[in-house]
Amino acid sequence: MKRTLPLVLCAILLAQTGIANEPEKPQEDVLRPVRLQTYWGPVLLANFVMSSGEFVTTCDCLYDGGSGVGFGGGAFIQYPLTASISLLGQATLQGLGAEYSDTEIRPEYVSTPNSEGSIEMLEFEKTANVTATYILLDLRGMYEFGKSGVAISIGPAVGILVDDYIEESETLKTEGIIYGTNQQTEKQFLDGGFDQLYEKETLRFALAFGLSYDIAFGRNMFISPEISYHLPFTSLVGEYSDWKHASMQAGVRVKFGL
């Protein structure tokens, strides 16, 4: 019994010495939080343009329901406010044009070299290609869902019109008939800027919605594809307040940490 007691005491002392010499685990420094990261980089996108409202051109032709595809690019900066909320500023040059078409059957006087001519029902296809290029400035609030990489954004977008153009033509679809003025099956009515016919709106106000996903490819570097929608509040020209071009956008940002 006397020999056993010193052995037990030695074992206890060795255990306490091992525990005392064990290195302490690092503790989280709650007084010094991780620095929030600012990102910047280029952005590329494609637009699917959807037209609403109606407008009339020089030939008294009524158009509605046009659509088109455009492209754009620019740069952005994402500034964090909290771990989940940030401000997204973006400046891009975008094409928001659309193409319109309509078919009409109407009576026209048709003459031939060997007859006095007659009134016949002819088929015409009318087309109007509308070009509208803007510098778009977006300022959105962005919310990120934890560390999932998924984020939503919403905010105002202001567009400055830098290029506008309308090309309108009419094509005779009835076989064997041509225009007497140019001996062709196509006649052009309009070829120029909005201000030849309308009072154009140089500013475009819209509300932008976005859904994005970050894919890491390096330290503080991400590829961020996004689907967004621009809901316009202003029309293309002053005479037709309902004529607007909304856009659904598919884009990608390349994010670099500052």
Image: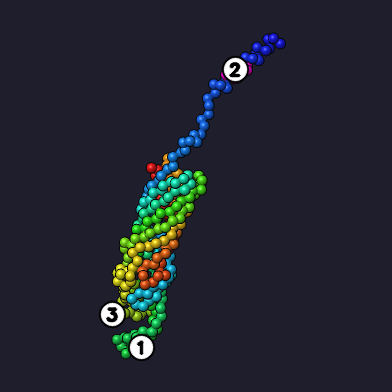
Question: Range of the magenta residues?
Answer: 11-17
Helix, strand or loop at label 1? It is strand
Mark 3 and mark 2 in contact? Answer it, CB < 8 Å. Answer: no
Mark 2: few, some, or many residues within 10 Å (few <14, many ≥20)? few
Q: In this view, does 146 lie to the left or right of 257?
A: right
Alpha-carbon span between mark 2 and mark 1: 120 Å
Image: 64 above or below 253? below
Amino acid bearing label 3? Thr
* Residue beneath the point at 29% across and 78% down: 183
Q: Where is residue 217 in the image (x, y as percent from the top left)?
A: 43, 43
Amino acid bearing label 1? Ser
Image: 1 above or below 220? above
Alpha-carbon span between mark 3 and mark 2: 111 Å
**What residue is pinned by disc 3?**
181
Residue 177 image-quadrant placement: bottom left
Task: Please name the colour scheme applied to the rendered image.
Answer: rainbow
Q: Position of residue 3 (x, y in %)?
A: 68, 10
Q: Nearer the viewer, mark 3 or mark 2?
A: 2
Q: In this view, does 142 lie to the left or right of 117?
A: right
**What residue is pinned by disc 2?**
14
* Residue beneath the point at 40% across and 78% down: 104
Count of numbered circles on the image: 3
